[in-house]
Each structure stands twice: as structure tokens, then as C-alpha cells.
Image (tube, rainbow, N blue to C red):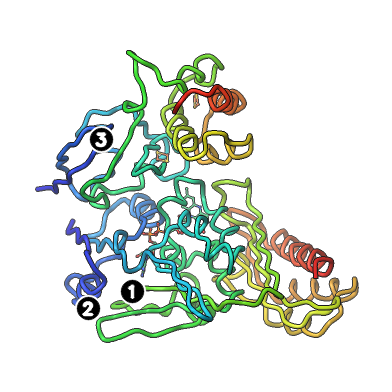
Amino acid sequence: MGKSIALIVNGKRKKVKAHAASRVLDVLRETLKLTGTKEGCGEGECGACSVILNGEVVNSCLILFGQLNDGDDITTIEGIGGKKKLHPLQEYFLECGASQCGICTPGMIMAAYALLKKNPRPTHDEIRQAVAGNLCRCTGYAKIIEAIERCATSNVKI
Amino acid sequence: MRYFKCENLIEALGLLADPDTRFPLLAGGTDLIVQWRMGGRMPEGVIDIGALEEIRLIIQRENVIEIGAAVTHSMLIESNIVRRYCPVLVDACRTVGAVQIQNRGTIGGNIVNASPAGDTPPVLMAFDAKVELANLSGRRHVPLREFYLSYRKTALKPDELLTRIIIPKHGPDEKAGFYKIGTRKAQAISKVALCVRAKIAGGAVNDIAIALGSVAPTAVRAPKTEAFLKGKKLDSFAVDEAKRTLAAEIAPIDDIRSTADYRRFVAENLLARYLEKASDAF
Ligand SMILES: Cc1cc2nc3c(=O)[nH]c(=O)nc-3n(C[C@H](O)[C@H](O)[C@H](O)COP(=O)(O)OP(=O)(O)OC[C@H]3O[C@@H](n4cnc5c(N)ncnc54)[C@H](O)[C@@H]3O)c2cc1C
Ligand code: FES
Ligand code: FES
């Protein structure tokens, strides 16, 4: 049983097969083995599971696989950058000490990435708003905001 | 689980008409998926209406604006029509969860979920909005004020779907305000929310509508306070008496998010904040 949907995952076309009632979070982590996306609360509060769906940041724990449509474009942290080549946002997170235990980091980067794609020069308040749905228990947020702000003002292309 | 992904409205209404396929309607899922997880089980089936283009439109007509039930909070925030004719609805949608929730959650889901703490119902009530409910045999319009029957009970029949929200255009001589008090600015369910829409000229109130969230089993209007304020000159006596009237009129409760006393106190002060600002601005 299961349902097959033609998706674009991190830029690659893929027919993905899963139960309609599975959460997109589980399909990413278990079917596609993209374990960079994390589960924190499982109920929409923490943003650890954030991914980008058709250009918008969403919580993958609150979307059922069946809610996806043919042609949907999903970007996860693996599509942003990795060990071989870090994305500038990831570089700034490292440089600013914006990641400690790291569980919130992929979600933070996805929220920041979605913001900078739409609004390359956000104000301090716009940055705070954009990550307001992403909880971090370690850093106290200041360094996260600083990393995003520095990336935004560095003129690198997102 | 039987998963019905609807391609059009008629298909969804057909599924609802048949008791064998009358499963929960799934729009954004930001309320339902959490409720299913908390309850520890999934339903036997779902009717997914999230992709129905027919109810994802915002349309402007001569005297009203119409918002499709599956329009998301983010679509409302970005809509020029809504910004122009009901800017406080934009203010309210901006306070719903955080971006991730605004990108998925719909106005129809917010209304039908019928939480007393939902953020869009007080605004829609203050604007005298109607909801359009449809089934296979037709459609009917119900003022949102009459849609909520009691705690989490609505006038929606088992075979009906909320299709549109119809908001009258109000004149530029009316000013509205939306205020929400929660634990923090983002991702917080309200302790109290208040929306006021009024026509004030020469310091006197010609017309006023006041609606609140989180102070009763459903979103409510405050008709006694409205009646008291109509025709009054907005001096400090009138504002004080309006606060007292409102405090006596609402019936908040103590719960995990706040206390009845705090809610009453904050509701009064939010009304005063609006009235003081409005009497200067007009
Ligand atoms: C972390 C988090 C924070 C939140 N913060 C807020 C907040 O600050 N303020 C707030 O108001 N809400 C908040 N919510 C609740 C929720 O996001 C909103 O109520 C949202 O608008 C629900 O829309 P939905 O499309 O996701 O609803 P769904 O979950 O899809 O549906 C909700 C209910 O409505 C019914 N339904 C949906 N569409 C229709 C229709 N067209 N016709 C008939 N029935 C229908 C469903 O069957 C279900 O019973 C929050 C939720 C989460 C998870
Ligand atoms: S795991 Fe999805 S928001 Fe927390
Ligand atoms: S770095 Fe540990 S939760 Fe953010």
C-alpha cells in the first residue's frame, strides 16, 4: 500500500512512495534517509523539523505525505550545504558560535534561508520574526540572530 | 487510513453527503494533526481540501470581500485586498503561531476549529462577517455571531463545508484595532484578544462593534458595552464606564493560560487603549 508522488527533493526529481497518513518528517528521515531534518516537539511548536516547501518554510511534522502534490519542491538542510561545501549561512553560524548542541540548527538555517530568499536585506526585527517559530535551548538566540544578520549584510548570494 | 485528495468542491461535498465517507475535513492540518497525535490515533479516513483552488481565492466585490476557506494566514497577510479593506485581519494573522504555521494554517480551519482563543474570529465578528456553508443541495449564509453555538460547537452540519467568508466593506471613516495579549509575541495562544471597529466623529462614537477572544466559551461580541458607547462623547468618564460595562459583560475563566481576573483587567485596558487612541485619531 501507499501513495506515489512526483516530488522535487533538493533539486532532484523523485517519485516518492509512502503512506498518505505518514508525516512528511518521517518520509524525509526514514524513506529518503535525509536525517538532517530533526524532530523536537512533533507538534508545531519548536521548528526543528522546518523544511522549505515551494519556497515557504513549513513544519514537516505537521504535514501528512498525502497533503503533498505532484511537482512539489522540497528543500531540506541537505540541499542547502554539507560537509563538502557549507552554505554561507552555515559558515556564519559556525563563526558566530550560533550552534551548540545543534538540534535546532537545521531548522534555524531553513527559516533563515527562506527569509533571505524573499528579503535579502531584512531588518533586525524581521530576522527575529522569521525565527520566532524556532526554539533553541542552548544559545540564547543572540548569536543566531547575529549570524543571520552578518550573512545578510555580507552580500553573498543566497 | 482512507485518504481522499479532493480535486474539486463537488467531490468533497459528495464524500460528506455519504455517511460512509463522511471523514474529517483536512485543510492545513495545523490543528488536526496535533489533535490526532495528542489523542494517540488517526481517524479512519480524511477528506483533504487543502488544494482546492475554488476555496483558495480572495475576491473583491462592490460591497464585500470574499475569502476562500482554504486561504492561508500568509496569503491573507500578503493580500492587497485584505490590507486595504480589513487591515486588522492582517494584524491578527501575523500573530497566529509563527511563519511556519501561517504558511499552512487556513482561515477556514481557524474558524471551524472553534477555539475560544482563535485569532481571526474576533476580527471577523467585529466586521459583521458571514460564513458561507455549502452541501450538495445548496449553500447558506450565516453571520459568524450565530455560527458559534457553545464551547467548540458550531452551526456547521455534518454534510456541510465552509466555503467562503464574506466581509462587508466598511467606510474609510471607520477605524479598527486588534490587540492580542499572550505569553510572548510569537507562537503564543492568546490570554485575551480584542477587536474594535468604530465610527467616531468630533470625539463622539457614532457606531461601534467590539469583539473578544479567550473571555468566553466562544469568540463573542460585547453588545452592552457597544450600546453604552453609542452616541457618547469619549471623555474619561465615558471610558471608565465603558471599562466597567465590559468587565461586567464578559465571563472569562481561570485556566492553564491565565486567570479570570487578569483577563477581565486586560480586556478593559485594551478597550481603553483603543478608545483613547481612536478619539485622538478621528
Ligand atoms: C504551534 C501552533 C501555534 C498556533 N498558534 C495559533 C495562534 O496564535 N492563534 C490561532 O488562532 N491559532 C493558532 N494555532 C492553531 C491553528 O494553526 C489555526 O487554527 C489554523 O488556522 C488552523 O487551520 P488549518 O487549515 O491548519 O486547520 P485544520 O487543522 O486543517 O482543521 C481544523 C478544523 O477545521 C475543520 N475545517 C478546516 N477547513 C474546513 C472547511 N473549509 N469547512 C469545514 N471544516 C473545516 C477541520 O475539519 C478541523 O476540524 C496554532 C497551531 C500550532 C500548531
Ligand atoms: S518537531 Fe515539528 S515543530 Fe517541533
Ligand atoms: S543549539 Fe542546542 S537547541 Fe539550539
Mark 2, secondary structure of its residue:
helix
Q: Distance between the Cα atoms at labels 1 and 2?
A: 10 Å
Within 8 Å: ligand 1 and the Cβ of disc 1?
A: yes
Rendered image quadrant of residue B116: bottom right
Badges 1 and 2, same chain: yes
Numbered tag placed on residue B17 in the rendering = 2
Residue drawn at point x = 22 percent, y = 64 percent: B6
Mark 3, secondary structure of its residue:
strand
Inspect the image, locate mark 3, and give the three-letter code of the amino acid beneath it.
Answer: Val
The quadrant of the rendered image in which ligand 2 is seen is: top left
Q: Closer to us: mark 1 or mark 3?
A: 3
Measured as percent of width and height from the top left, residue A96 is found at 56, 17
Q: Distance between the Cα atoms at labels 1 and 3?
A: 33 Å
Q: Which residue is mark 1?
A: B161
Measured as percent of width and height from the top left, residue A119 is found at 52, 38
Q: Distance between the Cα atoms at labels 2 and 3?
A: 37 Å
Inspect the image, locate mark 2, and give the three-letter code of the amino acid beneath it.
Answer: Ala
Badges 1 and 3, same chain: no
Within 8 Å: ligand 1 and the Cβ of disc 2?
A: no
Q: Is residue A21 left or right of residue B261?
A: left
Q: Which residue is mark 3?
A: A9
Say whether marks 1 and 2 touch (CB < 8 Å): no
Q: Is residue B30 left or right of residue B23?
A: right
Say whether marks 2 and 3 touch (CB < 8 Å): no
Q: Is residue A23 left or right of residue B212?
A: left
The correct choice, above or below, for B3 with respect to B196 in the image is above
